[in-house]
Amino acid sequence: MRLEQELAQDWMVGSQSRKHLPKIEEEIRKQDAIFNKEQARAERANCYESLFIFGRALKRTRKCLKIHGKIEDARRKLTQLQGERETISRSRRGSRRQDDLIAALARAGCGGNYQQEARKRRGFFFPFGEDGFFGSRPPAEEREPSSILPFATYRTMCVRLCDGFYYPVSFSTLPSRFKQDASACQSNCAAPAELFVHRNPGEAVEQMVSLDGRPYSAIVNAWRYRKEFIKGCSCKQVEYSPLDSQEGGGAPVPPKGSGDLGAAPSKTPILATQNQKTNRPANSR
């Protein structure tokens, strides 16, 4: 449990940092252009006077002082941005720590998902140990990513199949606890329901997928609850009526727990091996 928490925290920090890297790179290019532009203006305005021993000195005219201020402002911003970029680069190099934690979890038998991820990170070209023939391996960012990362945190949603209505089960959990969330979803809703998940942080609820990889948008009644009220389609036992919910115009609802929504299953099903206590939210209907 402790190793899982460390791995999830390490991944979350690195993921949030890397998300900002493109903006930082763009701002560095912008400030570098400003620095070069103002430096050229200073040269054209003859803002520097040569000193025989000490190089050059800035002329203290109003125009030159204004240009110099812009040059120094761009220089300060560049220094700060380059420091932020280096910090993120160090966090990316720290992916070796993630590899070691995943390998430890796999050796401890914490679930087939960790063993699969560990094998994937070692790769086919590293048969003589985790460091390969030459004692090095590509960083995690350069390897083929998993559709479901066993160490990433996810938000789990309970989807009512007769009208597509959904509510949260867990706001931040690990794949090893999906099984318990799925049980809570089905037991807390009288109508047939199925667990869907999306990465949190990193993805929106519209991107959630079922435990066998089917996108929410592919189910027959996706977002139908927003358009119409389906009589008999309810999570409350006293209000649920299988006959009424099917006569509402939608496709027949599969038996509870079947998970058959008519879409082709994913090639990479999500594995779940451990349990987690969850509660049904008060606003589910």
Image (cartoon, rainbow, N blue to C red):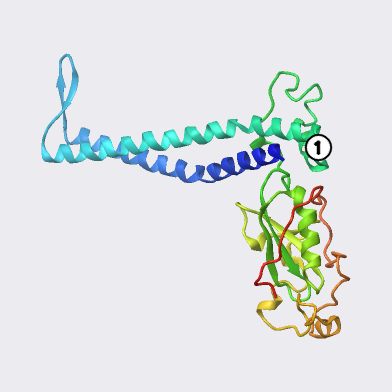
Farthest residue to the left: give it.
Answer: 61
On screen, residue 19 above or below 191? above
Q: Position of residue 147 (x, y in %)?
A: 73, 48
Q: In this figure, what is the number of numbered marks?
A: 1
Front-lying residue, 240 or 247: 240
Q: Quadrant of residue 139?
A: top right
Q: Quadrant of residue 226?
A: bottom right
How many other residues sit within 10 Å of disc 1, few (<14), some (14-19) or many (≥20)? many
State the residue at coordinates (32%, 35%).
75
Q: Secondary structure at mark 1?
A: helix
Front-lying residue, 56 or 84: 84
State the residue at coordinates (62%, 55%).
203
Q: Position of residue 188 (x, y in %)?
A: 77, 68
Q: Quadrant of residue 258?
A: bottom right
Q: Amino acid at mark 1?
A: Gln
The residue wearing badge 1 is 115
Front-lying residue, 205 or 179: 179
Q: Is residue 87 left or right of residue 187?
A: left
Q: Position of residue 149 (x, y in %)?
A: 71, 45
State the residue at coordinates (77%, 64%).
185
Front-lying residue, 125 or 214: 214
Q: Position of residue 59 (x, y in %)?
A: 13, 31
Q: Quadrant of the N terminus?
A: top right
Q: Is residue 220 left or right of residue 71?
A: right
State the residue at coordinates (74%, 67%).
159
Q: Quadrant of the C terminus?
A: bottom right
On screen, residue 205 above or below 8? below
